[in-house]
Structure formats: C-alpha cells, structure tokens
Amino acid sequence: MTTAPHRLRADAARNREKILRTARTLFAARGGSVGMDEIAKEAGLAVGTLYRHFPTKADLIGAITSELSDRIFTALDEAVARIDAGGSALEELTTLTERISTAAGEDRTVKAAMSNLGIEAAPELKDRAMAGLARIVEAGHAEGTLHPDVTAADLVLTMSTLPGDELPEPARRRWVTLILRGLTHRS
Amino acid sequence: MTTAPHRLRADAARNREKILRTARTLFAARGGSVGMDEIAKEAGLAVGTLYRHFPTKADLIGAITSELSDRIFTALDEAVARIDAGGSALEELTTLTERISTAAGEDRTVKAAMSNLGIEAAPELKDRAMAGLARIVEAGHAEGTLHPDVTAADLVLTMSTLPGDELPEPARRRWVTLILRGLTHRS
DNA sequence: GCCTAACATGAATGATGGTTCACTATAGGT
DNA sequence: ACCTATAGTGAACCATCATTCATGTTAGGC
C-alpha cells in the first residue's frame, strides 16, 4: 500500500509499540480528550517522539481506531460464518450485540467507533458492516426470529446507538434486552 | 429562594433576555461548545456584560437547561394528566417519546439534558421523572399494552438514550418505533 | 571503534476559550 | 439637572492543547 521502504530502527519500533499500548489504554478510559503530552509522559517518552511516529493526533486516533475496527469486523464475520454453518441467527445477533455493548461500556474508543458507524464513517466501513449485518438479517427472517420489517440499517442503528460508560453495566445489559425485543419477531 | 432583593435595571433586564435568547439558539444548534465571546458578540454585548449576568459559563448553561427541564416536565405531566382522564397510556407514551425525540434532534440542549437524566442528573430531577413515568408504566400495565416487566427505569433509559442530531430525522423516527416495540406488549 | 542516518528531546509557539478588572456609561430616584 | 448605584466595555490574563524545531543521542552498518 504505502511505499514503506524502511525497516524501523529497533528502538523506534519499541517506542511505537509503547505509544500504541499507552494510547489504547488512555483513550479507552477517557476518550479522545487525553492530551498528547500526557500520552507521551505516560509512555515514558517526549512529545516529539510521539509526533515522529504519528504526525497528528488524528493519525494516532486513526491507528487505534483502525486496529479496533479489525477486531469488531472479525467478530461480525465469525458470527456470519457460524450462521452459515447452521447456527441460530437470533443467538448470534444476541451474542454479538452483547459483546459490542460490553466493549462499548469498557472502551470509549469502541463507543466512538460505533457512534460513527451511524453517521460519518467511511463508506467502505459502513458498507462492510451493512453486508455482514444483511446476512444476519436474512438468516433471521428465514428463521422467523427477526421481525419481518427489520433491515440491516436497523441493526446499524442498534449498534451505533449502544450506550457507553455513561451508563452502568446493568443498565447496558437491560438496554440490549429491550432493543433486541424490538427487533425480534413477536412470538 | 435566593435573597433577590433588587429589581433589575431596565437595560439590565433587557440584556439578560437578549443573552438568554441568543444562548438558547446557539446552544441548540451547536451544543455547549460555543464560546462565551461568540454568544456575547451575537447578542450585541461585551463579554463582561455576559459575565455580570452569569458569573460562569456553567451558570448560563444551567439557566437554559433549567428552562428546558420545565418544558419537558410540563409535557410529561400533561401526558400523565391525560391518562388519568382516561386516555391511552400507550398512545401518550408514544406521543411523548416522539416529541422528545424530535426535540432532541433539533436542540442539542435537549439531547444533553436527556442524556444526563440517565446518569448524573440531580436526584430531584430524576425522581420527578421517575414519578411521572411510573404512572405511565402503571397505566400501561393495567391496559395490557406495556410489556409486564417494563419499569419506569426502563423508560428513563429509553428517554436518556434517544439519539440527537448525529442521526437524520428518518433514522430517529425509526429508532422510536423499534424501541417502543421493545417496550410494548407482544400482541 | 567510527560515523551518520535515524531517532529522541522538550522548551517554545500559536490557537482557543474561560474569566477578570480598571475604566466608562447610564438609569432612575431626588 | 444632578448623582451615584448599577450596569456595560473590552483588552488582558491565564490555562490548556496541538504542534514545531533546534539541538542532543544512538543504533547498527562499515
């Protein structure tokens, strides 16, 4: 993709990892409002070093958000795979929603990424999400467990409005229950 | 309540209103991130004047949020009154949710106030909300239109997670439909 | 062991935004 | 008309941040 001709020097590679690890933790706990200075200090480095690796704060956030997207899409793909292998769509949807809800409660980056999906996410990401969710919706309709008029867009809506750490865990759990009730077919 | 011995001078009263009017509009459109300088300029006043009336930005936001709470509680009380007068709980809940959803989409202060209800709102406010919503829940159970295990806390959850202007109007409408489906009794 | 391209450092810069205050203006009672 | 308590003004102050850059350090090829 990028030209990337140079192998990183050993110390540089080490520092890069330290930065990513630290930023992951701080962003998870307190969101994108943590300062670059604090990230650097916490990583035991100077700000300048941080900027050598990530020319902009947006770049740093982007790198971390990107890692995250991978993990989330993996979970989605696995759910779809299990459904294709004969698994229950309702069960997979439930588990997936619960997992993302928990993650959104524990990591503000997850919450932010999810909120973004609903609105200004790169079309590329949104399309990939829609594609996976569409498979789940299809299977749910075939199963008769999903309300007939529910669409993939509804699931995007569901995922993107999942509450974050502003709500305590029990409330988040309850929330998932209520939402899924609205999506599933009346028995 | 407060000692409030002094009548405001005419020009001061006029300016106070100008400030509130302007702040209402700006906060509605862009949230609490609008600067004090901008509010003052837009109101045709100097910042110092703004600070004479509201010693702190938090005070200004508080004043506006407070006005808002009144309007929202009025809507809630009216809904309860109509139910007491024999109206349908389901219908009132639907209308109330739709109204608040629309308001949250058009006014960021509403959205913020609602989000706050879920978490760090003054117990006084939360209690008042719970009381009104409890009446609706009761009536809904009696009617058989609300899912038996739904509680007032669930309605607080519903109201406090209503999406704001990050979602377009149709998505907000759809969202209300889905949520209400999760709350109402399976027919 | 030397040398230098890579890398790290952290004080300084510039932008933003809340808040203050010494000074000026005026409403409204006399 | 006059006086003064009230009110208004806006430049300046300060804290917070992202970002830069002149200077010092070091990994790793020779």
Image (tube, coloured by chain):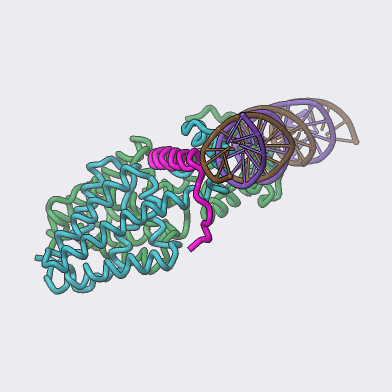
Chain colours: A green, B cyan, C brown, D purple
**Which of the image's four quarters has the C terminus of chain A?**
bottom left
Q: Place residue B24 in its image quadrant.
A: top left
* Residue drawn at the location 37% of the way across and 36% of the way down: A122
- The image position of residue A166, as x and y in percent, is 44, 59
Number of dots carrying numbers:
0
Residue in the foreground of this view, choosing between B165 and A177: B165
Q: From the viewer's perspective, is A81 left or right of B36?
A: left
| Residue occupying the far left of the picture | B187
Residue A87 appears in the picture as rendered: no
- Please tell me whether residue B15 belongs to the stretch shown in magenta: yes
Q: Please report the residue visible at 70 percent of the width from the left and 46 percent of the height from the top.
A: A45
Residue A138, visible in the rendered structure: yes
Q: Is residue B120 above or below residue A12?
A: below
Residue pictured at 34% horizontal, 40% vertical:
A119
The image shows residue D28 at horizontal and vertical percentages of 72, 37
Residue B124 location (% of width, % of height): 41, 67
Query: What segment is highlighted magenta in the picture?
Result: B1-29
Front-lying residue, A91 or A85: A91
Locate residue C4 relative to residue B98 in the image: left or right: right
- The overriding secondary structure of the stretch rendered in magenta is helix
Residue drawn at x 34%, y 62% is A98
Inspect the magenta stretch and tell me whether residue A66 lies in it: no
B69 lies left or right of C1: left
Q: Compared to B88, does D18 lie above or below?
A: above
